[in-house]
Amino acid sequence: MSFFPILKIEDVFASLSRKAKRDVTRVRELEEELFSKQADKGRIALRLREILPTTFDLPYIENVIFPALVTAAYKGERLSLPMIDPERFTKEEALPYFFWGMLYDDWKPNLEEDGLSVFIQGYANRGEDNHRKRIYYSALTPDLYEPMYKNKITAFFEQLFRPENANKPLMRQYLDTYFDLYWELHLGVTGNDIPSEVRQLGESFNTVLAYVNPIEDIVHDNYVRVRAFRQTLRNWIDQKIEDLLGGEIPEPQKTFAYYWLKNGEQGPDFRRKDVIFECFHNFVALSQWGNTIYQIMSKLSIDDGEPEIQKIFKEIMSSNFERADGTPFTPLDRFVMELFRTLSPNDGSISTLTETGQLESLYPRYGYITNPHKATSEEPRHWTNPTEFAPDRYIDAPTSDQIDEARAKEIGFAQCPFHQRSMEVKDGRKTELTNSAFGTVYGITDGQTYPVCDYAGYAPFGFGYRRCPGEQFTIEFIKDFLRKVWSDGIEFKNLRLENPERVPVGPTAVVDDNIGFTRST
Ligand code: HEM
C-alpha cells in the first residue's frame, strides 16, 4: 500500500459478484457500461445499487464506490535516483478519489477552503523551496525527540509491555492506547480529555484504511461515521489549538502543533485550518506504526520469526549500539533502517498523471502511478547484496549532507536539480532546515547535522522533496520499542490461538492478533 491504499478493481468486482450472489454476466455488463462512451453516472449508480449486497445510499455509491471502480493504478519505475518528477508525476491531490469523502464534506478535494496536508500538495504550490514541508518538518527534527517527545513514547511502551499484558494478543492492547499517544503528541491531550467521538472517528478512519474495499459493510459503516463526526473533531482540534495559544496546555513545546503554529505563523503556507487538517490527516501517517510494530514482532518471534534478524539484533544490542563512531548512524539506527528497507511497510510513492491528448474524457478517469519502495530498495544496481539483511550497508551509503552541487555535477547534471536553501526556524532553536540536491529536507541544530540516507537503494520513506518528514521520528520510535524489548528481556511468540481477533493495524493491513510476549524481568 501507499499511504492511502489503492484498491484493485478486480477485488471490487469480485466482492460485488460474490456478495450479491448474482450471475457474473450482470457484473460484466455493468463493467462495460462504466467504461462505455455513453456512461451516465446517475443510471449506473442506480444499477450498481441493485446488485450491491447492502443498500447503500446513492451519495455513497456515486462518490465512493463509483470513483473506486473507475480508478486506474499503474506500476511506476524502480528509480535510479531518489527523485520523482514534481510536475509530470505530481502530488497535487494524489489520493485515490474514493477517499476524498473521508477528508472533505463535498466528497471532493477542497484544499483552499477546508485546509490541506502537505501530503496532497504539488511541489509548485507549497511556497518557495518546499516551504510547507519545512514547516511541517520543524515539529519532527531529531533534536526535539529526546527533550520533547521521548518520555511520551517510552511511557507508551512501558504500559504496553507491563507484566499483566504478557501472554496476551498484543495488537489489541496497542490499538486501545494508541490514540492517547496520538493526541498527546499532536496537542498535549490524553486520557479522559479525548472525547469519545474523537476516539471513534480515529478508529473508524483507520478501519477504512485497513479494509479499503468500499463495498464491504465494515468500510461503509466506518466511512459514514468519519463523515458524521468530522465537524466535531475539527471543532475540538480548533479549541485545543486555542488552548495551546492561550497557554492552557501544559508544556506546549512538547506537541507537534506548537511548531506548526510557531513556524507557519498561520500564514498562507500553513494556515490555522491546515494545522487542524494535519492534526487529523496524520491518522494516515501514524497508523503505519501499528503495522510496522506487528511486522517487526513477527520477525523477532521466537517460534516462527527470522533467526538471522534475531541473531543480528542480539549482536547489536550486546555491543555499543548507541555509538556512531564517526559514521552517520549508530548500529541501532542501522538495524532499524534495514528493518524498514526490507519490510517496507509503505510500499510506494503515489502520484497523479495527466493523460496525453486534448480530448476531454466523457467522465473522469482517475489515474495514479506508484513508484515502488521495496523493489527499488532491492534493485541490484544499488547494492551488491540487495536482498541480504545487512545493516552495515549504511556505514558508507550516501547521506543527504553529501548530496551537494559537486555531487550533482559528478552524477552528470549541469546544475543541481534542487538548489540548496535553508530556512531558520522561528521557535527559538538554532535550527535550520536545509535540503540536498535531490530535494531531501533535513536539519542542522546548534551546528550538528542530522542527515538521512539519501539514496534510491534506501526507499522505505520515499524520495527527495516528497520524502517522509516523520522518518527520523519514526526511527526513534522504533528504537525505543527495541530498547524496551531488549532491556526487559522481552520475547515474542505466536500464541497459537484458535480464533484470533482480526485487527486493523495499518493501511491495507488487517491481521490476526496472535502475537504475545514473555519477559524475563
Ligand atoms: C512507519 C512509519 C512511516 C512510514 C513507513 C512512512 C512512509 C512515508 C513515505 C513512503 C512517504 C512518501 C509518500 C509519497 O511520496 O507518496 C511519506 C510521506 C509523508 N510522511 Fe511518512 N511514513 C511514516 C510515518 C510518518 C509519521 C510518523 C509522520 C508524521 C508525524 C509522517 C508524515 C508524512 C508526511 C507529511 C508525508 C508527505 C511528505 C511530502 O509529500 O512532502 N510519516 N511517508
Image (cartoon, rainbow, N blue to C red):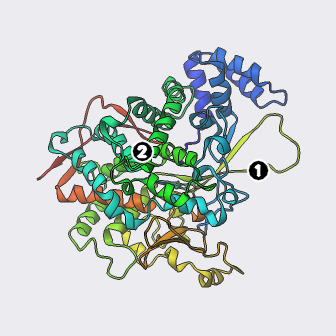
- Residue 344, position as x, y percentages in the image: 46, 55
* Quadrant of residue 317 within the rendered picture: bottom left
- Residue 151, position as x, y percentages in the image: 28, 56
Q: Which residue is mark 1?
A: 354
- Residue 485, position as x, y percentages in the image: 23, 55
Query: From the Cβ of disc 1, is ligand 1 less than 8 Å away?
Result: no
Q: Name the residue located 60 percent from the left edge and 33 percent from the top edge.
A: 101
Q: Name the residue located 62 percent from the left edge and 82 percent from the top edge.
A: 405
Using the image, determine if residue 298 lies above or below residue 71. below
Amino acid on which the number 1 mark rests in the picture: Thr
* Quadrant of residue 87 within the rendered picture: bottom right
Amino acid on which the number 2 mark rests in the picture: Asp
In this view of the protein, which residue sits in the foreground, 13 or 274? 274
Q: Name the residue located 55 percent from the left edge and 58 percent from the top edge.
A: 264
Using the image, determine if residue 9 lies above or below residue 39. below
Q: Name the residue located 83 percent from the left edge and 38 percent from the top edge.
A: 361
Using the image, determine if residue 516 lies above or below residue 431. above
Q: Which residue is mark 2?
A: 243
In this view of the protein, which residue sits in the foreground, 443 or 168? 443
